[in-house]
Amino acid sequence: MQAFIPAAGLGTRLFPFTEHRPKALVEVDGVPLLKIAIDNLTSQGISRIVVNVHHFADMICDYITNHSWNAEVIISDERNQLLDTGGGLKKAASLFSNTEPILIHNVDVLSRIQFSDLYQNHKSDNNFITLAVCKRSTSRYLLFNQVRQLVGWSNQKSGEIKWVFSEGPQFEQLAFSGIAVVEPQTLELMPPCNRPYPIVPVYLDIAKNHRISYFQHRPQDWLDVGTPDRLLQAQQWFHS
């Protein structure tokens, strides 16, 4: 597999840690989140990684250039316009091989998920896209039907529900972990990157014609470090 690390965001949830540096270079136990993600990916056999940049882009580019990696690490430059995860993935399309699945891994999550298990689940279920999920409390859920196919998304705070089809069947709600495997043909189905757009609405649209399912991992194998409070938790998680 190849990988995409969305690292262009403004990191507003991590302020003030992101006042003078990008979210990707915020440290857990002295190690930048970007290095943690890259090392995790390469230790599990990923040999080509695309990283997008915008906020403090020069700092990330210098960091990548000045370190040795066990993989080819390529920059997708969004200095001119921040494109969100969906638009960023589309912009980076030419940097990926069109013969291998792409593992998307948010830079602000820590994971002990075995990507080989995720990939085997993706292939054995004959999925077009496989989303890493777990059972945990969150404000937004992905909704899956009885054959594990993505059928919707819900926002618990606003009450909003978006269905893949006109009405929702019986469903299971699971929390998305910011990690996914997508077939390279996914990029051809995405809107142009002339504007920023998130990735989840893209998944919902693609699910109308292609199988999108999930890989369920243990909650303790994952941690979102997108807020200052979570950074404190990450210190303990990192050594547990």
Image: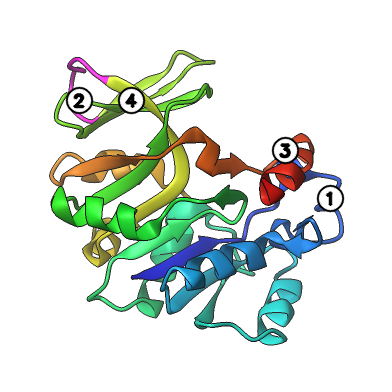
Where is residue 27? Give x, y as percent. Answer: 78, 58
Per the image, the residue denoted by label 3 is 230
The amino acid type found where label 2 is placed reads Asn
Q: Earlier in the sequence, mark 2 or mark 1?
A: 1
Mark 4, secondary structure of its residue: strand
Q: Quadrant of the N terminus?
A: bottom left
Per the image, the residue denoted by label 2 is 145
Q: Earlier in the sequence, mark 3 or mark 1?
A: 1
Residue 198 lies, with reference to residue 21, above or below; the image says above
Where is residue 109? Give x, y as percent. Answer: 59, 49
Q: Which of labels 3 and 4 is toward the front?
A: 3
Residue 214 lies, with reference to residue 23, above or below; the image says above
Q: Which of labels 3 and 1 is toward the front?
A: 3
Q: Which of labels 2 and 3 is toward the front?
A: 3
Q: Which mark is residue 162?
A: 4
Label 3–label 4 contact, CB within 8 A: no
Q: Is residue 102 magenta?
A: no
Label 2–label 1 contact, CB within 8 A: no
Q: Earlier in the sequence, mark 2 or mark 4?
A: 2
Tell me if mark 1 has few (under 14), some (14-19) or many (20+) residues whose alpha carbon lies within 10 angstroms of its own. Answer: some
Q: Which residues are magenta?
A: 164-171
Per the image, the residue denoted by label 1 is 17
Residue 102 lies, with reference to residue 126, above or below; the image says below
